[in-house]
């Protein structure tokens, strides 16, 4: 069976296992647990259109999860079927940011490409953050100034409360050709952000907003 689940979908499934664990520890009413299981199964099965019977057989055991150990065993079986981020090289990254003369590159060798929806990294010395993602089958690169924030906040990408920083991007105004800046708080650590991200659609909307503001 080929990989068929995206990183954000895997994260969503993982979140559902946590809901089931919490439900078993907090609820004693069998009807409540039954409804919780049915809801989790419906949500998980609705993630990917056109599931085969093999896909369903892999995901249906989520309703049997009662504790952390069972969740870990279930997720370990699902994990191999996560679609990795597309192959990317340092040369490709340099082509995406041609105006950056001394581009600080991420550690591609130690990146788990099954665990990312986008590739993001920081150049702390230059106070820059770089984001690479796929849209319509093509890689796109976005860079901006990045300043760490001293307090935790809500990330505009993954919508989780994490250590964030202000990501400031620049775009050309359509009317007069002048440039304008806009800042958004996003996770300092893009790997953490990718682990939290449960909707690639919302990520794509955010990136489109950055590029067309």
Image (tube, grey):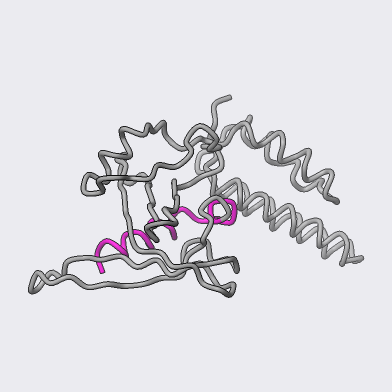
Residue stretch in magenta: 193-213
Residue 108 relative to residue 68: left or right: left
Q: Residue furthest left?
A: 176
Numbered-mark total:
0
Q: Relative to 34, does residue 27 appear above or below in the rendering?
A: below
Q: Residue furthest top?
A: 1
Given residues 52 and 126, the one toward you in this image is 126
Q: Residue furthest front?
A: 125
Residue 22 relative to residue 191: left or right: right
Q: Quadrant of the C terminus?
A: bottom left
Residue 28 relative to residue 134: left or right: right
Q: Position of residue 15 (x, y in %)?
A: 67, 55
Residue 48 relative to residue 35: left or right: left
* Among the 4 quarters of the image, the one containing residue 183: bottom left
Q: Quadrant of the N terminus?
A: top right
Given residues 124 and 23, the one toward you in this image is 124
Q: Relative to 126, does residue 175 appear above or below in the rendering?
A: below
Going 44% across and 47% down the picture, which residue do you hit? 118
* Among the 4 quarters of the image, the one containing residue 52: top right
Q: Position of residue 87 (x, y in %)?
A: 41, 31
- Secondary structure mostly seen in magenta is helix
Indicate whether residue 107 is drawn in magenta: no
Going 59% across and 56% down the picture, which residue do you hit? 196
Given residues 178 and 202, the one toward you in this image is 178
Going 35% across and 59% down the picture, which residue do you hit? 207
Q: Residue furthest right?
A: 28
Given residues 196 and 199, the one toward you in this image is 196
Indicate whether residue 212 is drawn in magenta: yes
Q: Relative to 15, does residue 176 appear above or below in the rendering?
A: below
Q: Position of residue 106 (x, y in %)?
A: 44, 42
């Amino acid at each position: 069976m080929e990989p068929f689940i995206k990183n954000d979908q895997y994260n969503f499934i993982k979140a559902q296992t946590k809901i089931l664990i919490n439900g078993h520890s907090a609820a004693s009413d069998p009807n409540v647990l039954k409804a919780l299981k049915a809801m989790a199964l419906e949500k998980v099965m609705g993630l990917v259109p056109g599931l085969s019977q093999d896909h369903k057989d892999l995901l249906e055991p989520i309703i049997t999860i009662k504790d952390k150990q069972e969740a870990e065993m279930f997720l370990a079986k699902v994990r191999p079927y996560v679609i990795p981020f597309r192959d990317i090289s340092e040369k490709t990254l340099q082509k995406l940011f041609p105006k950056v003369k001394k581009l600080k590159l991420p550690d591609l060798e130690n990146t788990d490409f099954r665990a990312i929806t986008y590739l993001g990294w920081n150049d702390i010395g230059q106070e820059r953050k770089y984001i690479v993602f796929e849209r319509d089958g093509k890689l796109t690169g976005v860079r901006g100034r990045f300043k760490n924030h001293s307090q935790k906040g809500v990330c505009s990408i993954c919508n989780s409360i994490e250590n964030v920083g202000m990501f400031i991007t620049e775009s050309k105004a359509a009317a007069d050709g002048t440039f304008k800046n806009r800042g958004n708080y996003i996770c300092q650590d893009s790997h953490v952000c990718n682990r939290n991200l449960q909707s690639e659609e919302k990520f794509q909307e955010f990136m489109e907003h950055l590029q067309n503001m």
